[in-house]
């Protein structure tokens, strides 16, 4: 069978870095091919070469047996190549429907907005990726924006589809439905290439796998010829053991963070939180499962003081902190790891030292008489780097040069540097490779062991099962059920995430002042 795509000896250099070093990749018609590798292994760079964003320094690309020159993104689109990038390519001020039509090339001088919205709604429902075509992109959560990108790619009708972490924000049922759709497309002759860190997806849905490490292709094999442990070894160059721990509960659970009947509006001026009741105890990880857009962002922002509650109360260590300022709440010992690390957590143009002190630049350890203590800041940043093994291009260089996993470790290291009582962590390993995931999980578990109360928001049910003591399910702004980890099942939690089962008015047992 003639390959639909052959990338031969692709080399891409940046100043001081060889991102791709003679990489080979072959893709056949009707194939679902997985591309694996740690953050910084060269996966995104290789795909950017294929889609015309970068020009390779060496190597050739063949499409259907013919050598092609992909020197700009439009050339890739014209050749039937489409990609959903990890960092989205959307216009924040336009609606979902306008973004999709803008990318599709189907726009005309006069367009019926209502007709656009109808077509986009039908197409998104066809692929079980429900999005609101009228919503402005800036109003959407990270997960919802990723769904828009997936719909946009499918709407454009590409023959070679590249998806970067396509299921990171989907429930198991939705992920299975997406891959079922992709399999149908593959059976119709289209070729699918997806990047993921979820090895069970690779073993379940891929036909063949290519692994990159340090910019080089270290192996391509059929899925039946390998195992998850072998893939991990190829990716990181060593064996990585899964993070496990004994779930021991405190003899006398002490509530640290309590929400009672919390309501809050979202960016669309509709109620995003509809009477949230939950309690996080000292030395406990309470996981929150839910499909993106069901109130996760608003829940975090109300707790840390970035959004006003329209009703109810937020209690921290017996003190009502409802609608207090973010600085007040952070000073009370609440750490926040937001879902958008580069939009809310870190500043890409600043260096590591500046980012390391964003939380407490005015504290005595970092400043004196209005002047920054640069020696102390340098020493503190270096200590973070050493303790958490944060790979970087220099403490004085912009963090935009760092990989996603190392950015996340920097963010988490900064937030725990003040010995917090509560950590609110939203999707802490989203888009992070297996090695960095292991490191981040160990940081959270160490904090739990030291008595910190942790609210962990994630759509990765494997992560929730591995780390949580209890799991609450968020649906349409309500905690519809809370289960002990001993009662956790993937099917049961997955159904609750889409509103099947559970009592929507159910409140959590153990919340002070709330009837059960």
Image (tube, rainbow, N blue to C red):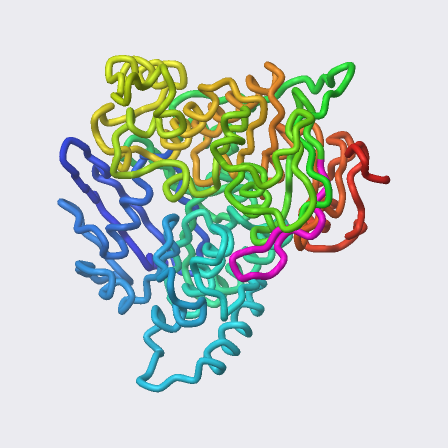
Image point (17%, 51%), residue name: 55
Q: Position of residue 432 (x, y in %)?
A: 43, 36
Secondary structure character of the magenta stretch overall: strand
Q: Position of residue 268 (x, y in %)?
A: 53, 62
**Outermost residue, right side:** 516
**Outermost residue, bottom side:** 110
- Give the quarter of the image for residue 314: top right
Give left or right: position of 10 versus 293. Answer: left
Q: Position of residue 270 (x, y in %)?
A: 60, 61
Q: Quadrant of the C terminus?
A: top right
- Choose between 164 and 413: the one closer to the eye: 413
Region of the chain picked out in magenta, as a range: 264-278
Quick check: is 272 in the magenta stretch? yes
Q: Can the viewer see residue 491 in this picture?
A: no
Q: Quadrant of the N terminus?
A: bottom left
Quick check: is 89 in the magenta stretch? no
| Vertical order, 22 against 127 (above or below) | above
- Choose between 474 and 196: the one closer to the eye: 474
- Choose between 184 and 265: the one closer to the eye: 265
């Amino acid at each position: 069978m003639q390959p639909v795509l052959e990338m031969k000896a692709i080399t891409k250099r940046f100043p001081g870095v060889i991102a791709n070093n003679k990489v080979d990749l072959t893709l056949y018609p009707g194939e679902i091919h997985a591309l694996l590798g740690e953050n910084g292994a060269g996966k995104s760079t290789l795909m950017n070469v294929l889609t015309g964003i970068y020009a390779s320094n060496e190597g050739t690309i063949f499409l259907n047996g013919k050598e092609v020159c992909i020197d700009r993104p439009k050339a890739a689109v014209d050749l039937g190549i489409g990609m959903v990038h990890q960092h989205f390519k959307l216009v924040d001020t336009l609606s979902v429907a306008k973004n999709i039509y803008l990318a599709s090339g189907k726009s005309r001088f006069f367009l019926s907005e209502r007709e656009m919205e109808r077509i986009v709604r039908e197409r998104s429902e066809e692929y079980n990726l429900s999005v609101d075509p009228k919503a402005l992109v800036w109003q959407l959560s990270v997960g919802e924006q990723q769904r828009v990108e997936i719909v946009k790619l499918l709407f454009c009708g590409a023959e070679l589809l590249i998806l970067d972490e396509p299921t990171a924000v989907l429930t198991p049922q939705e992920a299975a439905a997406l891959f079922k759709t992709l399999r149908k497309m593959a059976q119709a002759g289209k070729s699918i290439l997806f990047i993921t860190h979820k090895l069970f997806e690779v073993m379940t849905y891929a036909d063949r796998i290519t692994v990159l490490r340090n910019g080089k292709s270290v192996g391509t094999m059929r899925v039946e010829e390998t195992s998850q442990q072998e893939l991990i070894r190829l990716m990181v160059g060593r064996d990585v053991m899964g993070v496990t721990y004994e779930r021991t509960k405190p003899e006398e659970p002490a509530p640290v963070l309590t929400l009672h009947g919390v309501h809050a509006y979202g960016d669309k001026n509709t109620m995003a939180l509809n009477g949230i009741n939950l309690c996080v105890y000292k030395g406990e990880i309470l996981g929150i499962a839910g499909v993106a857009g069901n109130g996760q962002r608003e829940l975090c922002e109300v707790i840390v003081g970035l959004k006003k509650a329209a009703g109810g109360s937020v209690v921290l260590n017996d003190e009502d902190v409802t609608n207090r300022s973010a600085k007040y709440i952070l000073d009370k010992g609440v750490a926040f790891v937001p879902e958008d690390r580069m939009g809310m957590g870190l500043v890409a143009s600043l260096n590591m030292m500046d980012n390391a002190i964003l939380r407490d630049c005015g504290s005595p350890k970092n400043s004196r008489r209005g002047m920054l203590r640069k020696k102390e800041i340098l020493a503190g940043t270096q200590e973070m780097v050493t303790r958490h093994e944060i790979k970087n291009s220099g403490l004085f260089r912009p963090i935009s040069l760092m990989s996603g996993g190392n950015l996340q470790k920097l963010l988490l290291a900064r937030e725990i540097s003040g010995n917090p009582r509560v950590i609110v962590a939203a999707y802490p390993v989203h888009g992070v490779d297996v090695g960095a995931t292991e490191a981040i999980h160990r940081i959270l578990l160490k904090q739990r062991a030291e008595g910190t109360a942790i609210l962990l928001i994630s759509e990765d049910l494997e992560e929730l099962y591995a780390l949580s003591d209890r799991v609450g399910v968020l649906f349409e702004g309500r905690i519809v059920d809370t289960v002990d980890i001993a009662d956790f099942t993937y099917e049961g939690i997955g159904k609750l995430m889409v509103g099947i089962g559970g009592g929507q008015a159910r409140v959590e047992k153990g919340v002070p002042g709330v009837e059960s």
